[in-house]
Amino acid sequence: MLDAAIKALSQMFSPSFRSILLKAIGLAIVLLIVIGIGLQRLLSFLVDTGGGMVTTSLGPMAQTPVNILEWILAIIVGLGIVVGAVFLMPAVTSLVAGFFSDTIADEVERVHYPGDPPGRPVPVGRAIAEGIKAALLAVVVYLCAVPLLLILGLGAIIFFLANAYVLGRVYFELEAMRFHPVDEAKRLRKLNSGMLFVAGLFIAAFVSIPIVNLATPLFGTAFMVHVYKRLVAGPVPVPQRSY
């Protein structure tokens, strides 16, 4: 695992990866901005609507306290968006991976496994659909983990482990589908769930680093190519996929 992580890191800034890196980072930033604006608009609407209802119910005397409360809530909303962006980063990078996984995997296979049968590109629609499903899965898992985040001392650990589960699953399936039908790729992931959870810990550690985590699609995909190759122990037959 450690050797796979080192190989993935060493290739990330190679000339052939630079354009992909910039595109992946750019798309991740755009998605985070769009999500942030959407959350800001929604929360601001709720604050303004609630303040208006209180003022209408209690009369003009409540105007000043309501204004102060709205000001405090506006600060909380701003902080909440920043925190939300941190929590959503794994989901966003999983979605971005769906756009670039084949390009990244092709390059890793070309450099490190030139003698192996190359993987077949996953159809764009399927790759994006898997990225969206992965992002939604991440959000669901995180929402389930939120109550546990309030437990003193366990919050960060729970979030880290949740990331490991989701990211190990996402990146492995995107790579396995280059060699197997969808159902077979998912079955292979289930059969090796323990190993892939450990692999997910490496990606979760990477996505935990601010700013650097924008490059998670490159690291996660490259890393999982090496993990997949070791899991299947060399060249594997490429059955006809059915989508």
Image (tube, grey):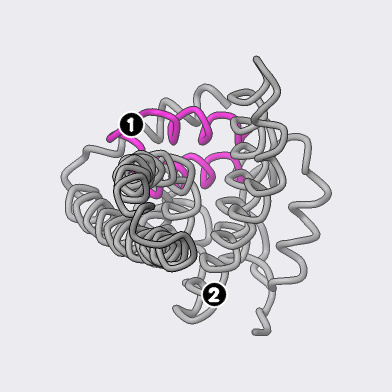
User: Given the image, on which type of amino acid does mark 2 rest?
Assistant: Ala
Query: Is residue 201 depicted above or below 177 in this figure?
Result: above
User: Could you tell which of marks 1 and 2 lies nearer the N-terminus?
Assistant: 2
Estimate the x, y position of residue 25 in percent, counting from the top left: 25, 51
Mark 1 crowd level (few <14, some 14–19, many ≥20, 10 Å Cα): few
Quarter of image, res 187: bottom right
Residue depicted at x 59% and y 62%: 136
Q: Which of the numbered marks, if any, corresponds to residue 210?
A: 1
Q: Amino acid at mark 1?
A: Pro
- Magenta part mainly helix, strand or loop? helix
For residue 102, side relative to residue 137 (left or right) = left
Report the front residue among 159 and 153. 153
Q: Is residue 205 magenta?
A: yes
Left or right for 49, reference 182: left
Q: Residue at x 47, y 72 (%)?
A: 121
Quarter holding residue 200: top right
- In magenta, the rendered stretch is 199-228
Q: Nearest the camera: 193 or 14? A: 193
Which residue carries the number 2 mark? Answer: 129
For numbered disc 1, what is the local secondary structure? loop
On screen, 90 above or below 20? above
Residue 100 visible here:
no
Residue 14 magenta: no
Q: Is residue 180 above or below residue 67?
A: below
Residue 190 is situated, as x and y percent measured from the top left of the image, at 80, 51
| Count of numbered labels shown in the rendering | 2
The percent coordinates of residue 101 (x first, y second) are 43, 60
In the visual, does 8 lie left or right of 236?
Answer: left
**Residue 27 versus residue 76 in the image, above or below:** below
Q: Quadrant of the N terminus?
A: top right
